[in-house]
């Protein structure tokens, strides 16, 4: 059948770097404004977005899921002289919990 697009959020903030979870049930994304920034997840069928992590406005970000869907990586790119940073965050309501983040290999994008 034909898919009908619909808007997941209704906020005035800028949303970017969407990433589908491996099971296609959630989307991770970054939401920014002039003064705020956060990493969010939202059900792919709509609903309330949940903030997982605050970030720094004015930076560039990329979101990537682990293959098992248990972790989200937030890759932060700063000005040329500031090194990139990767923050690994456990996804709430997942079945397993570990104290260490898995090795996550990122392909170039």
Image (cartoon, rainbow, N blue to C red):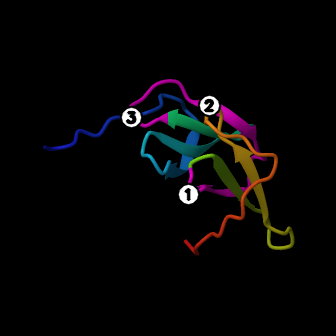
Q: Which corner quadrant holds the N terminus?
A: top left
Q: Which corner quadrant holds the C terminus?
A: bottom right
Position of residue 77 measured from the top left corner of the image (x, y, whole percent): 74, 63
Q: Is residue 89 above or below residue 83?
A: above
Q: Which element type, helix, strand or loop, lies under badge 1? A: loop
CA separation, marks 2 and 1?
Answer: 16 Å
CA separation, marks 3 and 1?
Answer: 26 Å
The magenta region covers 43-68
Q: Is residue 15 left or right of residue 23?
A: right
User: As rendered, which of 102 and 35 lies closer to the eye?
Assistant: 102
Q: Which element type, helix, strand or loop, lies under badge 2? A: loop
Give the residue pinned by disc 2. 93
Is 78 one of the magenta-colored residues? Answer: no
Q: Is residue 82 left or right of residue 86?
A: right
Q: Is residue 109 above or below residue 56?
A: below
Position of residue 53 measured from the top left corner of the image (x, y, whole percent): 74, 39
CB-based contact (under 8 Å), mark 2 and mark 1: no
Q: Is residue 87 left or right of residue 109?
A: right
Give the residue pinned by disc 3. 7
How many marks overall? 3
User: As rendered, which of 87 and 77 lies closer to the eye?
Assistant: 87
Q: Quadrant of residue 79?
A: bottom right
Q: Which mark is residue 67?
A: 1
Outermost residue to the left: 1
Number of residues whose C-alpha sits closer than 10 Å to that of mark 2, classed few (under 14), some (14–19) or many (20 or more): few
Identify which residue is drawn at 42% across, 29% down: 46
Number of residues whose C-alpha sits closer than 10 Å to that of mark 1, classed few (under 14), some (14–19) or many (20 or more): few
């Amino acid at each position: 059948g034909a898919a009908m697009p619909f808007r997941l959020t209704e906020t005035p903030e800028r949303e970017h770097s969407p990433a589908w979870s491996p099971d296609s049930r959630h989307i991770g994304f970054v939401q920014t404004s002039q003064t705020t920034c956060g990493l969010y997840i939202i059900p792919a069928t709509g609903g309330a977005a949940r903030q997982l992590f605050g970030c720094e406005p004015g930076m560039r970000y990329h979101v990537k899921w682990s293959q098992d869907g248990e972790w989200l990586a937030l890759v932060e790119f700063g000005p040329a002289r500031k090194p990139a940073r990767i923050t690994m965050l456990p996804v709430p309501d997942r079945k397993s919990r570990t104290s260490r983040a898995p090795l996550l290999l990122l392909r170039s994008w």
